[in-house]
Amino acid sequence: MAAAGWRVTVVADGAESRVDSPAGIALHRTGGNVPEGERPDARAYLDSLCRLTGLALRLPRHDVVVTMTDPPMLALAGPMLAARHGAASLHWCQDLYPDLLPVLGVRMPSILRRLAGRGIARALRRHDGVIAIGRCMRDRIAAMGVKGERLCLLPNWPDPVIRPLPKPGNGFRNLPGGLEGESRFLVAYSGTLGLAHPMDGVVEAAARLQDSDPTILFLLIGEGRGFAAVEGEARRRGLRNLRRIPWQPADRLAESLSTADLHLVTMHPAAEGMLVPSKLVGVQAVGRPCLFLGPRGSEAAARVGGCGLVIDPFDGAAIADAVRSYAADPLRCAAEGAHAARQSAAWTADGAATAFAAIAERLLPARRITPPMIARPLHNA
């Protein structure tokens, strides 16, 4: 957007970064504490919301105010900030709060959650535009009373650094600890693992396949408080075909994702319409088939069509059967992986930026004069 002539200001939580902002982008940080490790609680989210809003109120006038969804209730600030600046307000919904909070394990009294839900619905109806990242999310927002002409669908896109890499020569398979070269059929889960990502069925599938299919290995890559429970259950069951390695740096993302023959993406059924697993676009960008372990009516389930299967995340027997079927059919893996790569290539960061700029352009006040436009995304980085 900056390259297209917009002047962009980003308001982010946390301490000042030593990394210079790209040309045309001004970065303002609140200097506040962003909790690391465990997911923040309701108080931490509220503190972050106040810091971000307070800083944004002190900035010069902007033409478009964009709020995002972390911290959860930032949509409440959008109309207020827009009124302060005489600007258009656009909410970019990545996760639908506060309904998602219980799924993520964030405790909040039920009466407070209901009040927050009514407040968010009222705020979304006051925004000039609302972006949903999936059709199920768009439908849920529409049911909250947001008019159809104000609702836009803009799916997330894969990181441009992710690309398909062939298995032969992939150094990731020879990491310390051993993935036993290229002889194993690797089933990978890559990314954050939290309460919204049930793994009960995956552990059960690994237990079922351990003795009958010794060439199959489940590989967990990433961080999150959900890993402790999975590793504890794996030790209790004596699983030798389930291993974990830590989060990988961005410059190894293509390599780590490409090392798998089959990927797993999980989502709790209760989260349908509230989020779309972002890891799915990365999996498809490396040209690998995927088992989506989540609700069939969700956006992620629709995107898996033709390049994977949708399975109940708690059905270990069905997951085991599917993994065994893929391991026995390399031609199927190759065909579905190629379909996934083509599907991913059709929606890039450049295409998404063009679409987003067009949405923002339509919201600009009619009284705006010719100087370059200014957009301000707000998020908790």
Image (cartoon, grey):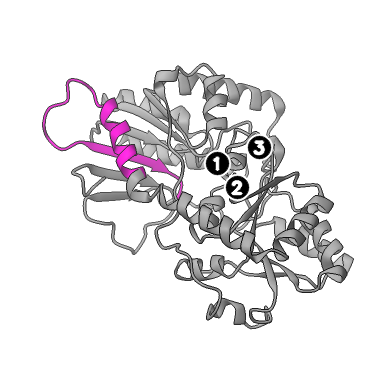
Q: Amino acid at mark 1?
A: Tyr
Specify whether 30 is left or right of 307: left
Residue 378 belongs to magenta span: yes
- Callout 2 crowding tier (Cα within 10 Å): few <14, some 14–19, many ≥20: some
Element class at badge 1? helix
Percent of width and height locating residue 146: 48, 19
Residue span colored magenta? 352-381
Give the percent coordinates (x, y) of residue 285: 48, 57
Q: Which residue is mark 1?
A: 45
Which numbered circle lies on residue 80?
Answer: none
- The answer to whether the residue labelled 2 contacts the one labelled 1, judged by CB atoms less than 8 Å apart, is yes
Residue in the image at 11% along x and 31% along y: 370
How far apart, in angstroms, are the residues tagged by discs 3 and 1? 20 Å
Residue 273 in percent (x, y) is at: 60, 33
Amino acid found under the numbered disc labelled 3: Ala
Query: Which of the two discs, 3 and 1, labels the residue nearer the N terminus?
Result: 1
The residue that disc 3 covers is 271
The residue nearer to you, when weighing 309 against 355, is 309
Label drawn at residue 40: 2
Label 1 neighbour load within 10 Å: few <14, some 14-19, many 20+:
many
Q: Secondary structure at mark 2?
A: loop
The answer to the question of whether label 3 and label 1 lie on touching residues, with beta carbons closer than 8 A, is: no
Q: Amino acid at mark 2?
A: Pro
Lower sequence index among marks 3 and 2 = 2
Which residue: 53% across, 49% down?
278
- Disc 2 to disc 1, C-alpha distance: 6 Å
Q: Secondary structure at mark 3?
A: helix
- Estimate how packed mark 3 is, as few (under 14), some (14 to 19) or many (20 or more) residues with alpha carbons within 10 Å: many
196 relative to 119, above or below: below
